Image: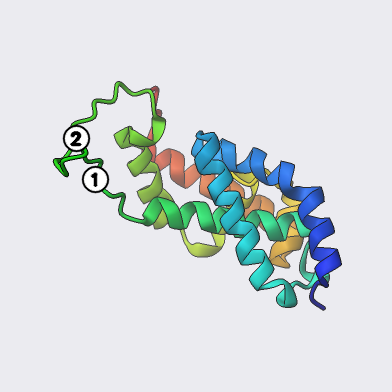
Amino acid sequence: MGLSTEQFNQMVQEHTPMLMHISLGMVKDKHEAEDRVQEALGSAWKSRDLYNADKGSEKSWLAKILKRRVVDNWRRPQPPVTTSTGDPMRVECFDLDPSQHEFCTDIREALDRLPDCIRETFLLVAVDELTHQEAADHLGIPIGTALSRVSKARHRLHRQLGDFRG
C-alpha cells in the first residue's frame, strides 16, 4: 500500500498529460489548468502513502484529486479585480468566458442538489472522462450501479436545467 517516491514520480510523468487535458476541459484557461494540476499533484504527493491500487487505477485516483481541486477553486470567492490605485476595475464580459455565464452557476447548483454518490459518479464519467468501468472500480461499486447513477444524474440535471441553448 502507498507509493514510493520512484513510483510517484513515474505516475506523475505518465499521467500529467491526461491531467492537463481534463483540467483544460474543466477550466478552459491554460494557466488556471496548470495551477489546478499542480495543486492536484501536490495533494497526491501528500497522500501518496494512502494510495491503494486495489481500490482503483492511478488514473482514476489522480483524476478524482484533480476534480476536487477544480471544484474547490470554483467555490473560493474570487478577489475583485482592482486598478493600481486600488479602485475596483469594471470588466465587461460578452459571454466569451462560459464560467461567467449565469447558467454555469445554475449547473453548479444543480450538481450540488444531486446526492453525493450520484454526483461523484457522474463527475468521474462526465468531467474526469473516466469510463463507467474505471469510475466503478474507483468507487468500489458494480458497473451497473455506475451506469445507473450516471443515468439518474443526467435525467435529474436535464429536469432541473431544461434544454439550455446558450
Give residue 102's position: percent from left, percent from top: 30, 36
First along the sequence among labels 1 and 2: 1
**Quadrant holding the N terminus:** bottom right
Residue position marked by numbered label 1 in the rendering: 80
Q: Residues under labels 1 and 2: Cα distance? A: 8 Å
* Kind of residue sitting beneath label 1: Pro
Residues 82 and 132: in front is 82
Could you say where residue 22 lies in the image, as x and y percent from the top left? 63, 42
Give residue 89's mark: 2
Query: Can you tell which quarter of the image residue 33 is in?
Result: top right
Q: 62 or 11, which lies in front?
A: 11
* Figure quadrant of residue 68: bottom right
Name the residue at 35% across, 50% down: 109
Q: Where residue 151 sits in the image (x, y, percent)?
A: 59, 46
Nearer to the camera, 94 or 142: 94
Query: Does residue 69 appear anywhere in the picture?
Result: yes
Q: Dot 1: within a 10 Å radius of its alpha carbon, few (fewer than 14), some, or many (20 or more) residues?
A: few
- The three-letter amino acid code for the residue at tag 2 is Met
Residue 146 — which label? none
Describe residue 42's horizontal placement relative to residue 158 as left or right: right
Indicate the secondary structure of the residue bearing disc 2.
Answer: loop
Q: Are marks 1 and 2 in contact (CB under 8 Å)?
A: yes
